[in-house]
Image (cartoon, rainbow, N blue to C red):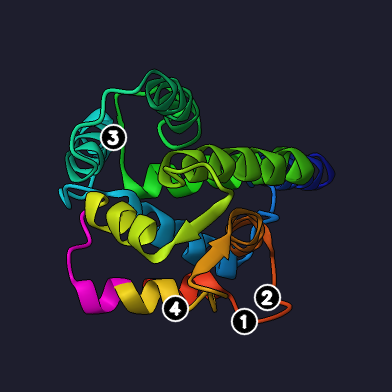
Amino acid sequence: MLYVTVLIVLALSCSGVDMFIRSTPPERKASRNLIKKWGQWYTFSDVNHDEVISDDDFEQFDHNFYERLGNVNDGQLNTIKRRFYRIWKEVILNYQKEISKDDFIEMMAQRYDLDQKAFTEMIREFTKALCKVIDVNGDNFISEEESMTDLAAAGHNKMTENKKFFMTFQPKNGVIPVEKIITEFARSVTEKFETKPDLFEKAYTDL
């Protein structure tokens, strides 16, 4: 009887361990550094500062941006805007109605864990589409005026801080190459550990 009891206890113990192992979520590939960066990105993207991102934020940005351009009605600009909205809806909201900060970070972590190469490419395409909107004259450079218009449209209205943001990227002849912005942002939100100073993180602290 004692022998049978011991076997039962051992079986239950092993079963419990096995259930624990199977129920334990896999270890995240994303570092604390990345999770922090995704949180900063979320906060920056919350245009109306209501602590949730939804279509309202895109519409607010769109209204602010084109109002500062004098409500330009240009076919090419409208095409660029529509393309950016499609990418924004996919990358930021994952086609949902709205998303909280915690859910946004979890979504990014899942995408990162699934395929880091694809994740990086997604970020680059997102940033490239955004720069197409900001780069109004289409010269593949972002001027201080274009940067200030973008930041103000995104709900950041302190001129001194916005200028510091622009200057963080060490513009030459008053402009920043679009490719530099794409590369630096992709590095900021996809690099597990920093290999050199993160310009976007430094820029965010000025806002």
Query: Which residues make up the magenta segment?
Result: 155-162
Q: Give, as a three-letter code, the residue at label 1.
A: Pro
Q: Secondary structure at mark 1?
A: loop
CA gap, disc 2 to disc 3?
Answer: 30 Å
Q: Secondary structure at mark 3?
A: helix
Q: Give the mark nearest the N terminus, 1 or 3.
A: 3
Q: Quick check: marks 1 and 2 in contact, CB under 8 Å?
A: yes
Q: How many residues crowd around disc 4 within 10 Å: few (fewer than 14), some, or many (20 or more)?
A: some
The residue singled out by tag 1 in the image is 197
Quarter containing the C terminus = bottom left
Q: Which one is in front in this view, the residue at disc 4 or the one at disc 3?
A: 4
The residue singled out by tag 4 in the image is 167
Q: Give the mark nearest the N terminus, 4 or 1.
A: 4
CA gap, disc 1 to disc 2?
Answer: 7 Å
Q: Which one is in front in this view, the residue at disc 2 or the one at disc 4?
A: 4
Image side of residue 50 versus residue 172, left or right: left
Image side of residue 128 versus residue 26, left or right: left
CA gap, disc 4 to disc 3?
Answer: 26 Å
* Nearer the observer, 200 or 167: 167
Residue at 61% x, 44% y is 123
Residue 145 falls in image quadrant: bottom left
Image side of residue 11 versus residue 202, left or right: right
207 above or below 78?
A: below
The residue singled out by tag 2 in the image is 194
Q: Percent position (x, y) of residue 100?
A: 31, 43
Q: Give, as a three-letter code, the residue at label 4.
A: Met
Q: Is residue 161 magenta?
A: yes
The residue singled out by tag 3 in the image is 58
Q: Which one is in front in this view, the residue at disc 1 or the one at disc 2?
A: 1
